[in-house]
Image (spheres, rainbow, N blue to C red):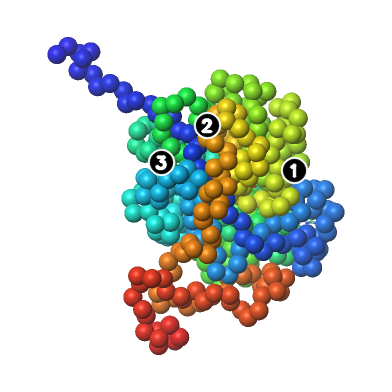
Amino acid sequence: MNETSATPAPPRQHRAHVTGWGRYAPSHVLTNADLEKIVDTNDEWIVSRTGIRERRVAAADETTASMGAVAGLRAIRTAGLEPDDIDLILLATLTPDYWMPSTAALVKEAIGNTKATAFDVMAACSGFVYGFATAQAYIQAGLAKHVLVIGAELLTRFLDYTDRSTCILFGDGAGAVVLSASDEPGGALGIEMTTEPQGAYMIWLPAGGSKAPPSAGTISRGEHYVRMEGNQTYRFATKTMATTALESIRRSGLDPTDVDLFIPHQANIRIIEAVAKGLDLPMDKMFINLDKYGNTSAASVPIALAEAVNEGRVKIGDNVTIVAFGAGFTSGAVTIEWTADPARGLLGDAAVKPEDVTVRLPVDWDSVDPIPDALAAIMNRPGSLDVPLDDVAPGEPEPAPAEVHA
Ligand code: UT7
């Protein structure tokens, strides 16, 4: 055998096509007028400086995992797949249910998948795009056939409702896509991702990690809430969103004018306007839904993507660029040649009712009301807790009543 024939052939490179998409937003709406009641702000300031009019707030019985599971299952149904067809689950979040296990592991069980590897991706608001790019790499390498990528966030439980510069920006929700291996042309094309640690403390959550474990002191100083240098983050975002998108488009062999629709991270309308200007494109090429949801961090791009497709803004053959920036500082963009029938999204939505998706809860765990005090009155909830957190899911051993009520 000569040297050439002994050399193993390089593995075949598959393409990653978006075959499914889905989203979930909690039903409770928090308007700018609601926020006026709890912090020194006003609708005019919020709309003119950010474009946000309202955002969603998760109910007491909802978590990042429960929202991610609904969006993920909808994406699987849109793709015409069964949960066990998925062999990798990536969940991007900065607001996991717990530090461990991963929220992806909880979602895997909730959607009824028994086969997938599941893990979380931590890259703040760029997390979904990082997860998408990771899924694309797994598929191209032949390591996965169908990957579920979820972006899910429950930010309203990590905000300081006395800090008007942050609490007006963020909301809750989840979005997801299924990426499937195919040898057909199209699908995900050029990727660009950046990480610039000099921005590490521009958006951060100081306490709860190994540097500052939670204590009465960290709580009394409000170090368990999101902190942000808004102006510097704004400057980074306007620059990096345009350059990151441009590099992804260039790596796809395209020009910005070849892109039919941009799905930018929904942080601030002024940032998106600056990106459009930087790329010399009209605003009607930028999909916007931040007026309805605010900034949902890692969930913002997949919610916007699913909504854009379901609203008929994307057709087969279109080039779509998803682009995000976030804490880290991170940024990421992927350009996609769309190949799926857009009409399938409505089937996926209709097939999955949120009340049919259950995330198993721990036994022997005291109920806590997770709704922040500042929001509880506005949400006008009777009683302190809508759903007891010590409800036991089917299959768990029943705890003794004395343990539950101790
Ligand atoms: O996913 C990444 C998340 N982060 C971001 O996307 C943040 C990017 N940055 C931004 O979007 C903007 O910087 C903000 C929306 C956060 C702030 O807008 P700005 O135009 O940069 O305002 P500013 O911070 O320069 O503040 C201007 C004024 C200040 O008052 P004075 O000092 O001029 O009297 C603030 O105290 O606006 C005041 N202000 C507010 N007023 C009413 C700040 N927040 C509010 C508020 N309501 N909610």
Residue 95, percent from left and from top: 54, 57
**Mark drawn on residue 146:** 3
Q: Secondary structure at mark 1?
A: helix
The residue beneath circle 2 is: 339
Sequence order check, earlier mark of 1 and 3: 3
Image height of 405 relative to 310, above or below: below
- Label 2 CA crowd tier, 10 Å (few <14, some 14–19, many 20+): many
Left/right placement of residue 143 relative to residue 179 reads left
Name of the residue lying farthest toward the right: 44
Q: Residue at x 76, y 68 (%)?
A: 38
Q: Percent from the top left, x then y, of residue 182?
A: 41, 31
Quadrant holding the C terminus: bottom left
Q: Which residue is mark 1?
A: 269
Q: Is residue 179 above or below residue 365?
A: above
Q: Is residue 226 above or below residue 141?
A: below
Name the secondary structure under disc 3: strand
Q: Is residue 205 visible?
A: no
Q: Residue at x 82, y 48 (%)?
A: 48
Q: Quadrant of the N terminus?
A: top left
Q: Quadrant of residue 269?
A: top right
Give the amino acid at mark 3.
His
Crowding at mark 3 (Cα within 10 Å: few <14, some 14-19, many 20+): many
* Badge 1 amino acid: Ile
Which is in the foreground here, disc 1 or disc 3? 3
Q: Residue furthest left?
A: 1
Q: Residues within 10 Å of mark 1 (few under 14, many from 20)?
A: many
Viewer-nearest of labels 3 and 2? 2
Q: Earlier in the sequence, mark 3 or mark 2?
A: 3
Q: Is residue 404 visible?
A: yes
Q: Is residue 151 left or right of residue 184?
A: right
Residue plotted at (54% across, 23% down): 251
